[in-house]
Image (spheres, rainbow, N blue to C red):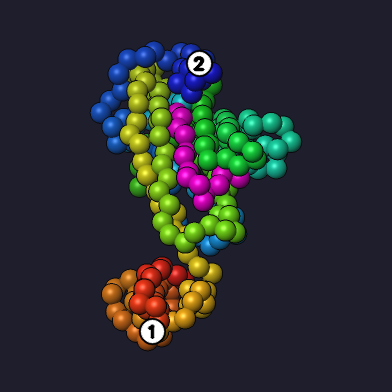
Amino acid sequence: MKLKSLLLAACAVVGLSASALPNTSATDSLYIADFSATPGQTIEVPIRFSNATAYSALQGVVFTPEGVNIVPYDIDEELGDSIWLVGTGRTTARANYQGTVAYNAIRANGISHELRIVVYQAVNKAIYTINKTGKNNEILLAKMNIPENATLGDYKCSVRKMHYSTGLVDQSADGDGPDTEFTVHVVATAVKDVTTAKAVKSVKYYNVAGMESAEPFDGVNIVVTNYTDGTKSTTKVIK
């Protein structure tokens, strides 16, 4: 079943119609912030929803390239691809903020690069209300893994196929949201890892402010390595 069909089916439960959404649907979005990871590392990444309109149902699909794998949770392995849970950080004391979250890690040969997400509230209440505090709502935590043999560099990922529906009785509507992108920076585990591949002539270190040093800075370093064969490389690493 297509994702939009799933969402519209959920909307039918809450009695929504399919009229046009307010203009905020052009900016309201599911997104993941850029992050850094090292080869072999598994990290939990928050999937957030930034919105100016209250919705009772929403969906999106996270896509990652080769080199960034989506990891199913243990319960996902035990019960199949679909898992139902309450959005992270929600409690019964905040029922108007709760919704059922279904996610489906599409896998090929045990590896996933596609995570489908559907969130809905089966009553006439909004799952995620307008962000009056300025903080974006966390939908769930996605696990991602960088393979041991991953090449260092930047990996472009995206959240696409977003669709929202409101839960307002006097303004029921549904519509599509914008695509968003995020970057996974795959970096070396330490500065010394960058200089062990072949004979090094010289190494220069730069911090994020552009300052140069013969020794690595604490934190993020841009390492420019000159080799005896005349080649050079530029790598971002964390000390």
Choose between 41 and 132: the one closer to the eye.
41
Which of pointers 2 and 1 indicates the residue nearer the eye? 1
Choose between 207 and 172: the one closer to the eye.
207
The kind of secondary structure element at disc 1 is: strand
Query: Label 1 neighbourhood size at 10 Å, few (<14), some (14-19), many (20+)?
Result: few
Choose between 237 and 3: the one closer to the eye.
237
Q: Where is residue 74 in the image (x, y as percent from the top left)?
A: 70, 42
Figure quadrant of residue 204: bottom left
Magenta highlight on residue 237: no
Query: Label 2 neighbourhood size at 10 Å, few (<14), some (14-19), many (20+)?
Result: few
- 96 relative to 9, above or below: below
Answer yes or no: is residue 129 visible. no
The stretch of residues the image draws in magenta is 58-71
The kind of secondary structure element at disc 2 is: helix
Q: Image point 53% across, 37% down: which residue?
A: 115
Figure quadrant of residue 202: bottom left
Q: Position of residue 33 (x, y in %)?
A: 41, 51
User: Label 2, on which residue?
Assistant: 9
Answer yes or no: is residue 155 visible. yes
User: Label 1, on which residue?
Assistant: 202
- 146 relative to 124, above or below: below
Cα separation between marks 2 and 1: 62 Å
The three-letter code of the residue at mark 2 reads Ala
Magenta highlight on residue 68: yes
Q: Where is residue 140 in the image (x, y as percent from the top left)?
A: 53, 42
Q: Image point 29% across, 36% down: which residue?
A: 27
* Residue furthest out toward the front: 229
The three-letter code of the residue at mark 1 reads Ser
Instruction: Name the N-terminal-most of marks 2 and 1.
Output: 2
- 192 relative to 28, above or below: below
